[in-house]
Image (tube, grey):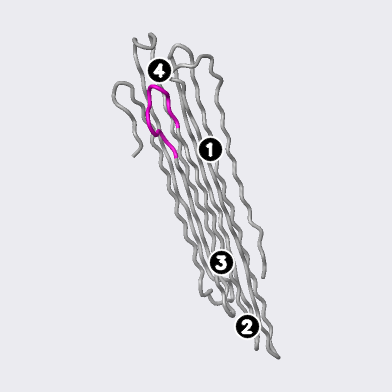
Amino acid sequence: MIRMKFFTALIISAASLSQQIVFATQPNVVGSGWVATGANAGGNFSLGSNGSATSYAQNREAATAKVTTTADNTPKYTVVNAGVMGATTTESFGKAYNLSSGSGTGSATSAGMADTGVNGKTGIHGVSTGFNGGEAGTHTSNKVQAGVNQGSYVSGETKAGFDTKLHYEKSGGKHSGATRVSSYADGYAGGKNHTGSLTGLNAAGIASIGASGKFFAKAGLSTDIGPVKAP
């Protein structure tokens, strides 16, 4: 049996600007992320008196997750900001084949998976309430199972991400003056997969790859207009 190594990458970063004075409107921004990958490859062969057989399998998986958080606060309620940004990616590749002649027979199997997940939350105390934004996750899995004189490959990429921002600005003190609120949210999710047979060989009995990706981003502010709630 051939054992393949697999790669896992995780990047989590956070930044928060120093606060001069703590107000009820101090931003509260958090973020989290996780990744998981797994890969395996195996093969077998059997030879008679006049035969040859070669089995080969390869699997390669990679996943990344990144979270960036920011929080700003200036005195006298003039400007308050918050924000969460997250991104995930996966890369997946597998190949398996067998070459047999005469009385030789063989098989090879390649299988793998990669998962990513990012979580986020942002808020301005006393202004926004409830969930404000986050979540981006992708998944990919594949398998190639090749019999005698069969061979195929699978290849895929997925990505997902989001960005949420909040803004609150009030002039004239805590209980008077003008109020300005704003929010921003966007996100994306996409991927591509390919399967095919190897040159000169029949297609493998099983050659499949699947992927799923999602993003969810929501940003909102409420002052006198009601709370913001998670769906």
Residue at screen point 70% across, 90% down: 50
- The disc labelled 3 sits on which kind of residue? Tyr
Q: Secondary structure at mark 4?
A: strand
- The disc labelled 2 sits on which kind of residue? Thr
Compute the Cα span from label 1 to label 3.
Answer: 33 Å
Q: Nearer the viewer, residue 90 or 155?
A: 90
On the image, numbered disc 1 is attached to which residue? 67
- The disc labelled 4 sits on which kind of residue? Glu
Question: Residue 60 at what x, y percent from top left?
Answer: 61, 59
Q: Are marks 1 and 4 in contact (CB under 8 Å)?
A: no
Quarter assignment of residue 171: top left
- Of pointers 2 and 3, the one earlier in the residue sequence: 2
Quadrant where the C terminus sits is top left
Compute the Cα span from label 2 to label 4.
Answer: 74 Å
In the image, residue 205 above or below residue 224: below
Question: Residue 120 at what x, y percent from top left?
Answer: 47, 37
On the image, numbered disc 3 is attached to which residue? 153
Q: Which label sits on residue 105?
A: 2
On the picture, is 125 further left or further right than 146?
left
Compute the Cα span from label 2 to label 3.
Answer: 20 Å
Compute the Cα span from label 1 to label 4.
Answer: 26 Å
Neighbor class of circle 1 (other Cα within 10 Å; few <14, some 14-19, many 20+) is: many
Residue span colored magenta: 122-134
Q: Are marks 1 and 3 in contact (CB under 8 Å)?
A: no
Q: Secondary structure at mark 2?
A: strand
Between circles 2 and 3, the one closer to the viewer is 2
Q: Which label sits on residue 169?
A: 4
Neighbor class of circle 3 (other Cα within 10 Å; few <14, some 14-19, many 20+) is: many
Compute the Cα span from label 3 to label 4.
Answer: 55 Å
Quarter assignment of residue 51: bottom right
In the image, residue 194 above or below residue 91: below
Neighbor class of circle 4 (other Cα within 10 Å; few <14, some 14-19, many 20+) is: some
